[in-house]
Image: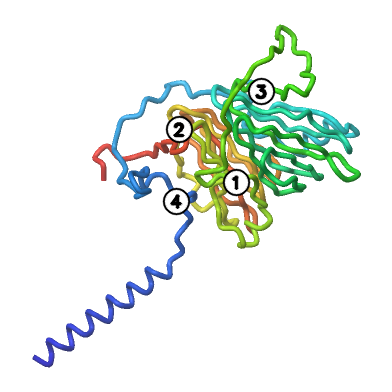
Amino acid sequence: MRTALKIAFCIAAVAGCLSVLIAQQPVAPAAQQPAAAGGRGAGGARQAPTLAWAPKPLKPNTWTAPNKPHTKLADLLAKHKGENDWTETIVSDDYLHADYIAMGPGKKTQPRFNPDTREWWVIQDGQIRFTIEGQEPFVASKGYLVQVPYRNTYSMETVGDKPSLRYEVNIAGVKKMYPITETPPTIPGMEFVRVSIAGKGKYEGGNRPYIDFNETAAGRDKQMRFIADDRAVANIIMGRGAPNDNPATKGHFHEECAEFWFILQGQMRYAIETLPTFIADQGDIVYVPKQLWHLASFAGDGPATRLAMNGYQDIGHSYAAPLDGK
């Protein structure tokens, strides 16, 4: 009897130690957890993955201009050296459109709004005063992530003594509308007509006017999903640099949508099907077409963060799986 009690006590002690060890393991925020663990069902519960056959072109997809694998901020700045105002389209596909835009000191946009879609920005340099309908005006500097819902009038103005630089993202095919008090710009092949349009998008479902990534990096702001919209998503994914200790891993691919990333902090390592592995620095943009294997990992020797953007709230991540399902 005494021996049995000793055995039971030892088993309980081991179980208790294991439970403590498991509890101490770091758990990634939901936005960072690998999609291989499955999508989310009702109430946000994670579901088991489904084994399936995914169609993949025999000839890998390629990049269609202006999209390219790696846009280096350093190259853009060198190209536009001495210019205060310039625009470079970085992403343009069936789902999203994104431009790098420099705007000189004192320059401002007209008040305007998107009729049906959300718009968002990553501030890379300088300072921009945002005036957004229903919000107190605020000044955004490097690291700010700003968004505005549909039919909310907004304007931007560069403040300070140097140009501002922003990365501006829209849903593909967006059209701008202007308050009736404004004189719209001239657009070849278009005329502006007087209309009445009702309803406005709201900051809801986790969306808010801005996230100061500096607060995120310091651990004071825990929100990892920046854009939550039925037409797009943008997630903050953080980690620390590490050696490329598993170069054989292919990562995953997305069946129906391309994906791209803005490097918010540090360096990211990218292994993309058909390309040599490369490193992207802060401010760089990386783009991968649909149906291409890709793997993003944290590089360098410090903290690293990417803002991942694509056209679906719960985009499918297709990982390689053995034929026997084991």
Amino acid type at image mark 2: His
In percent of width and height, residue 240 lies at 59, 57
The mark found on residue 208 in the picture is 1
Residue 66 image label:
3
Q: Earlier in the sequence, mark 2 or mark 1?
A: 1
* Residue underneath mark 2: 254
Question: In which quadrant is the N terminus drawn?
Answer: bottom left
Q: Residues within 10 Å of mark 1 (few under 14, many from 20)?
A: some
Q: Is residue 242 above or below residue 185?
A: below
Relative to residue 38, is residue 88 depicted above or below? above
Say which amino acid is labelled 4: Gln
Q: Where is mark 4, residue-wise?
A: 33
Q: Secondary structure at mark 4?
A: loop
Q: Residue at x 49, y 28 (%)?
A: 257
Give the residue drawn at x 51%, y 23%. 61
Task: Give the side of residue 326 with respect to residue 115, left or right.
Answer: left
Which numbered disc, 3 or 1, marks the residue that appears first in the sequence? 3
Quarter of the picture containing the C terminus is: top left
CA gap, disc 3 and disc 1 = 30 Å
Binning the other alpha carbons within 10 Å of mark 4 as few (below 14), some (14 to 19) or many (20 upward) gives few
Mark 4 and mark 1 in contact? Answer it, CB < 8 Å. Answer: no
- Picture coordinates of residue 195, whole percent (x, y): 65, 16
The mark closer to the camera, 2 or 1, is: 1
